[in-house]
Image: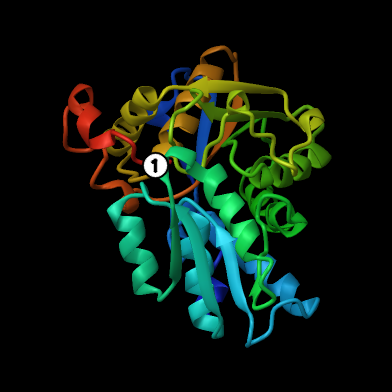
Amino acid sequence: MKRTSCDILDAIGNTPLVEIPRLSPNPGVRMLAKLEGFNPSGSVKDRVALYMIEKAERDRLVTPDKIILEPSTGNTGIALAMIGRRKGYRVHVVMPENVTLEVRQMLATYGAEITWTGRENGAAGAIARAKELAQDPRYYMPNQFANQANLLAHYETTGVEILADAPQVDVFVAGLGTGGTLMGVGRRLKEHNPRTRVIAVEPNPGTLVQGLTSFADGYLPPLLDHSLLDGKVIVSARDAFARCRELTEKEGIFAGISSGAVLHCAVRVAERMRSGTVVVLLADSAWKYLTVGPWTENISLLGDSLDGKVIW
């Protein structure tokens, strides 16, 4: 029997790794999904937020009188707000004004302070504004995009958990965001088996997909080490939505839009394999995208509801 957790923060990590056989296009390929939506605030970013805050505590960079400041399009801001609420820190999130209604509501529920930036500048605009605000000594900005604690969270937890449940991983597929997940998990898996392939998923250039970034948009994550990547696949928003719906209909898993993109890539990879095991990381649950999601509407008719929204 699982022990009772002493604290909500103890519930971060140790998420399920489940079989998704109905999505595998190849009977010789085993497909497994790491369900990060089972973290307390609903995403993989709980791991990162906890590691960044606790490292800052050890380094005495964050104290009760400091305000934690971070640019985000959703998940990291929510994770920091949840952990900040538990630990007693004020959290200030800088984000584009075109995030979904659910993201706004969750941040308000956790008591986060928010600075809105123009939708036309996307995440880059939020990052630039956060850097300006961070000049004020009242703030401490963890900066998930360059913080080694981001990578370390996945190297020490996510990757270890995957290997404990599936010692033989032939391919690992995850979204390209900050690069922390791909680098941390990828490094751990390759140390265990150098032949493991690590595949990055990115959206079409200009597509506003929460949690994913495109090289073609000029964004190069500081944490990214290209030598650890064995390939990258570009996925359209429409394909991501279609796979989200398929995942719900065939496996009963309600995961976010980026998960659909990652799954679409994994299916394409599995089609080209003779046998083996493919692990996909599904970064969050889908409740934050209900107002723009594909689960109950005709995907071909979603254009108006998606207009300008950050959907990953």
Asked whether, in this view, residue 186 is left or right of residue 241, the answer is right
53 or 287, which is in the foreground? 53
Q: Secondary structure beneath disc 1? A: loop
Query: Which colour style is shown?
Result: rainbow
Residue 15: image location, x then y, percent:
52, 57
Q: Is residue 282 visible?
A: no
> Relative to 230, does residue 56 appear above or below in the rendering?
below
Rendering quarter of residue 190 = top right
Residue 233: image location, x then y, percent:
57, 21
Asked whether, in this view, residue 83 is left or right of residue 22, the answer is right
Q: Amino acid at mark 1?
A: Val
Residue 114: image location, x then y, percent:
44, 66
> Relative to 59, does residue 194 appear above or below in the rendering?
above
State the residue position of label 1.
310
178 or 184, which is in the foreground? 178
> Relative to 277, does residue 286 appear above or below in the rendering?
below
Asked whether, in this view, residue 261 is left or right of residue 57, the answer is left
Q: Residue at x 78, y 42 (%)?
A: 187
Residue 16: image location, x then y, percent:
50, 53
